[in-house]
Amino acid sequence: MQLLYEGKAKRLYLTDRPDELLMEFKDDATAFNGLKKTQFKDKGRINKRLTYYFLNLLEQDGIPTHLVRDVDDTHLIVRRVEIIPVEVVVRNTVAGSLAKRTGWEEGRLLSSPIFEYYYKSDELGDPMITQEHIREMRLATVRELNTVRFLASQVNDLLTGFFKKIGIRLVDFKLEFGRLCPQKKDIILADEITPDTCRLWDTETGKILDKDRFRRDMGDVMGSYSEVLGRVAGAVHA
Ligand code: UDP
């Protein structure tokens, strides 16, 4: 298989179909722009399963995603897209860089969700940008941005509700969108939805169940990811 792209936690390979790619979830974990690196046995398998469950759930609720089908422990077939180089962060509760930037107390529930945009650029360190920057840089059209914003809000509503049922607070998360190839007209949800890209806190105990355990050397990283997978799988198969 020809490798098309290698990221920090995933690889993308060409398939025999021009409109589909094979997505591989790696055990590699990185934080702080790649400065902190390690591997966790089973991370790829857990993150693949979680992404599969979430994208499936979202598809069932009418969100267009790049998911095509499950392959094996660490691989999915996905639709080929041209990624819009903007990370969309949706926040329901104050945490991470929002707390740092504003001085707001970590853990405070926001009165309504906050949407942020970050320019995907390793060289610049993924700076936060506004919709006007996105337009000026021609990263996306106004129409595309409206779709992205609408879909991100729907994803937030659906995921927040789902996590609530399994005793988890969806604090914040990151999404990426792409233009469906080859026409590049339709915007669909791409990438992954995992504890690498979401902040997840146990509703009862407040226990952190996401990548912050790795970022902050809290230990039990894979135990927490497994806990999330167990609850998600339980709800999906109920
Ligand atoms: N996030 C991500 N990839 C990034 C940056 C952030 O998946 O490159 C996620 C992160 O896991 C969290 C949310 O986006 O769930 C908000 O992250 P924040 O801006 O607080 O940045 P952090 O301090 O986590 O880098």
Image (spheres, rainbow, N blue to C red):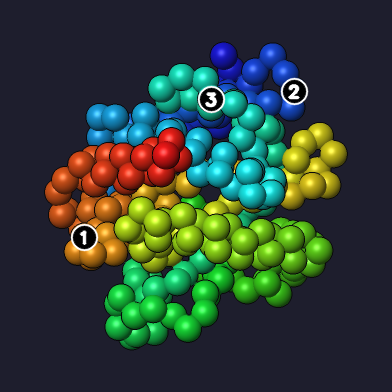
Residue 196 in picture, x, y percent from top left: 38, 48
Question: What is the crowding at mark 3: few (fewer than 14 residues within 10 Å), some, or many (at least 20)?
Answer: some
Quarter holding residue 180: top right
Determine whether, in the image, residue 165 is placed left or right of residue 149. Answer: left
The reply, left or right, for residue 180 in relation to residue 40 is right
**Where residue 161 sits: x, y (%)?**
48, 60
Q: Nearer the viewer, residue 117 or 107?
A: 107
Specify which label sits upstream in the sequence, 1 or 2.
2
Q: Give the CA distance from mark 3 to mark 2.
A: 18 Å
Residue 9 image position (x, y, % from top left): 41, 38
User: Residue under circle 1?
Assistant: 207
Which residue was labeled with disc 2? 18
* Residue depicted at 69% across the width and 64% down the height: 150
Element class at badge 1: loop
Locate the N terminus by quadrant. Answer: top right
Residue 72 image offset from top left, x and y in percent: 46, 19
Amino acid type shown at disc 3 = Asp
Question: What residue does disc 3 label?
Answer: 70
